[in-house]
Image: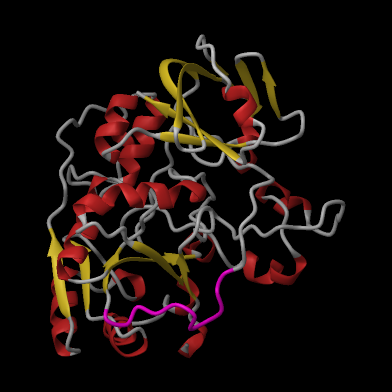
Amino acid sequence: MANGCRISQHLTGCNLGFYSRIQICSYVAGRNSISSSLRPFGRICEKHLQRCLSSSHASGDNIGCLQARVPGEASSLSDYFSQQEDDRDLPSEGSSSLTGGIVALGKFDALHVGHRELAIQAAKAGIPFLLSFVGIAEVLGWEPRAPIVAKCDRKRVLSTWAPHCGNVAPAELYVEFSTVRHLTPRQFVEKLAKEFGVRGVVAGENYRFGYKAAGDASELVRLCEEYGMRAYIVSSVMDKNQCFTNKGSIDSNDKGQVSSTRVRLALAEGNMKYVSDLLGRKHRLMLQVTDQEGFVIRGKRITALRSCLLNLPPKDGLYESCSLVVNDDILVPCRTIIDTTHIQVESDEKSAWTKVLQDCRFVGIEFE
C-alpha cells in the first residue's frame, strides 16, 4: 500500500490491534533490553520495538483537539495496564482492504452511543468499517492514558452493535497517524478514494480532518462528491443527562454531545448509571488473570493489583452491584472494592466459578 500506510483489520478474539498507547508484543521472559521508561507498557519484542515506539492511542473525538485531563486519573500508566497482556503482530501492508466499504471516521476509544450511530449509518449504506488513527498521542505529545474499552473486549462490544447494523458487526481498521498527518483535506479524501477504494464515508457533524484539522464536515461532503464517493454526515447524539459535576473539565468543542471525555468524567466520579447511559451498555472492567502474586483467588474473593487492569476503572470506592464475567457467559453477582493499589472482588454465591477462573486469560467486572 502506497506511502507505507499500515491498516490493521482486527478479526479475532483479543487480536484487536490496540486502543492503548503502544503496540505490545510478546517478549521473551528474562530479557532486560527494554528501557525503564517502556516497562509499564509490558513486554515488547525487539523485532517490533521501533515500530512500537511510533504507535500510541488516539484519544478524544476530534482530530487536532486536545482533551482535558480527567480529574483523578492516575499519571502512571502501569496503574491501569497489565504488563502481561500480549498482542499479535499487525497484518502486513495490503493484507486488509476497504474496497467498496463504507467507513465511519473518528476516534473510537469509548465505543459510546455516538460512535454506534456512525456505525449504524455506515451499515445502512454498505459494509461498515470503523476507521481511526493510531499514534496521535505520541506524534502530538499527548500524555498516555488508559483506554476506556480494553482491546480484548472490543470485538464483544462491536458484536452487540450487530442488531443495530443489519446483523453485521463493524470491522475495525487503523491507519498510522504519521502517514496522514500532513495531508491536506483534499489529499486525505483522495487517499480514501484511490488507495483504499472506499465507496463512502460517515462522519459526525463536528468532524475535523486534514492537516491542523483544516477540513470540516461540509468540505468532506464536497470533496467526497468530487472523488465519486458518498458522504453521510450524522448529527451528534446529545447527552440527555448532563449530570456530571466537574463541568470545568469539558473542552471548548463540547456542545452537550455524548463524548469520550464525558465517559471519562463519569468514570472519574464513579457515576456508573451515567456511564451506562453514555456507552449504551454496562461498563466492563477487564483484568488479566496471571499466575503471579498480582492476581490471587482465595475462596470467594479475588484480589488483583491495579497492574492487572486492562482499561480505565471507575473512581476508587465500593461498588455493591456488580457482576463477575467469566468466559463471557458466567455472570456471578459480586461487589467490587477499588483502591489505589488493588481491586477486590467478593461474592456470596456458592458456585464453581473459582475453578473456571484458573483456565481464563481475562475476567470482566460489569458495573450496574
The residue at the far top in this view is 348
Magenta stretch mostly in which secondary structure?
loop
Residue at point 53% right, 50% down? 143
Q: Nearer the viewer, residue 279 or 298?
A: 298
Residue 312: give x, y in percent of width and height.
48, 37
Q: Quadrant of the C terminus?
A: top left
Q: Is residue 253 visible?
A: no
188 vs 287, left or right, is: left
Q: Nearer the viewer, residue 94 or 236?
A: 94
Residue at point 49% right, 74% down? 178
Residue at point 14% right, 34% down? 240
Q: Is residue 214 above or below residue 274?
A: below
Report if residue 99 lies within the magenta region. yes
Q: Quadrant of residue 266?
A: top left
Residue 134: give x, y in percent of width and height.
47, 65
Q: Is residue 274 visible?
A: yes
Residue 97: give x, y in percent of width and height.
39, 80
339 vs 208, left or right, is: right
Q: Nearer the viewer, residue 335 or 210?
A: 335
